[in-house]
Image (cartoon, helix red, strand yellow):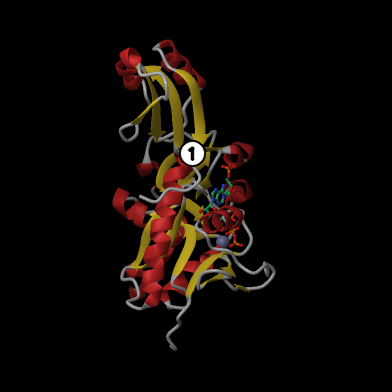
Amino acid sequence: MKPRDRLRIAMQKSGRLTEPALDLLNRCGLTFRQSRDKLFCFGEGEPVDLLLVRDDDIPGLIAQGVCDLGIVGRNVLNEFKGTAGDGAATLTEWRSLGFGRCRLSIAVPQDVAYNGPNDLSGLRIATSYPGLLGTWLREQGVVATTITLAGSVEIAPKLGTADVICDLVQSGGTLVANQLRETDVLLQSEAVLAGPDALPTDERGDMIELLLKRLDGVIQVRESRLLLLQTSRNTLDAVTRLLPGGPQPTLLPVAGQPDQLMLQALCAGEVSWRQLEEIKKAGAREMFVLPVEKMLA
Ligand code: PRT
Ligand code: ZN
């Protein structure tokens, strides 16, 4: 294959992961010429292009070297790694991305007693994930029949084509609507940045490293808040003790008020009203909680 000098990222063309994946790439400073109805989106600023495909095709495109990276659910990536040939084993999760969270679970009809995986012996299990299910059944020492379906797995027990199912669950609403009950979780999933084990050694490798650094910054700040407040020196200890987790706060003098300090703290998560009220009671005032947009350590 002819070497490429531009990085190529595969992502879902149209589905649950499309908007959050594009948003994440935009936050990393990557923008693309609008051609969402097409397969290929040319990157405008950086030498990074997008390939818009069905999510199931993404691991294969990376394994074949058609794309350098892909944004795909861990469920799809691991199913591919479990069922495809040798090349598949070399795919890695470079980052987990914090969206598209769901789990792959066994669910049984609500009116059926269930005491554990052994109860699945001899049953027919409908799933779109035969690889992951097969591995789990082997680990449990259970022999059952896998019925592979491309979609509408949840209605298989009602139709009589299977006894139980193994499918993705998020809110659990689909299971309830189909009189099913979740029993075992096989995999916790979310969208991941997938790529080969070994990064390319040319400019594309440099670009991937740059992208990973930006991603880390974006992922870190997505949850971070900057807390600003004023406190007198004698309440500083009490205030500091109540600060949410994060690196050491920065202290700045307040002009014309030698006993006062301005405190600046990066917090690892949300800061609630309750926490703010407690910190205020300890002696803080002029408090601000700000979202963090970019961070480069
Ligand atoms: O066309 P293409 O093949 O690209 O799309 P697709 O239909 O295969 O994928 P899509 O867009 O439905 O899902 C893409 C990815 O989103 C999945 O591979 C998962 O990694 C992730 N994801 C997150 C989910 C869900 N949540 C989810 N709830 N994928 C599917 N579901 C379905 C599930 O199969 C079940 O039918 O939603 C139903 C359950 O949802 P709850 O909320 O009722 O429990
Ligand atoms: Zn799909």
For the point 36% across and 72% down, the residue is 205
Percent across and percent down for residue 275 are 44, 20
Residue 24: x, y in percent? 53, 54
Say whether residue 167 is left or right of residue 32: left
Give the camera-side residue of 144 and 250: 250
Residue 66 in the image: x percent, y percent?
47, 78
Whether residue 133 is visible here, answered yes or no, is no
Pick the front one: 290 or 188? 290
Q: Is residue 154 above or below residue 194?
A: above
Report the quarter where the N terminus lies: bottom left
Please name whichever residue, 268 or 254, is drawn nearer the observer in this view of the structure: 254
Q: Is residue 193 above or below residue 40?
A: above
Q: Which residue corresponds to the image point at 47% horizontal and 65% vertical from the top-left?
A: 70
| Residue in the image at 51% along x and 48% along y | 99
User: What is the secondary structure assignment of the residue under circle 1?
Assistant: strand
Label 1 crowd (10 A; few <14 / some 14-19 / many >=20): some
Q: Amino acid at mark 1?
A: Glu
For disc 1, the marked residue is 182
Where is residue 189 shown, x and y percent of the image? 44, 49
The residue closer to the viewer here, 51 or 170, is 51
Residue labelled 1 has its Cβ within 8 Å of some atom of ligand 1 = no
Residue 198 visible, this orientation: yes
Q: Residue at x 44, y 56 (%)?
A: 192
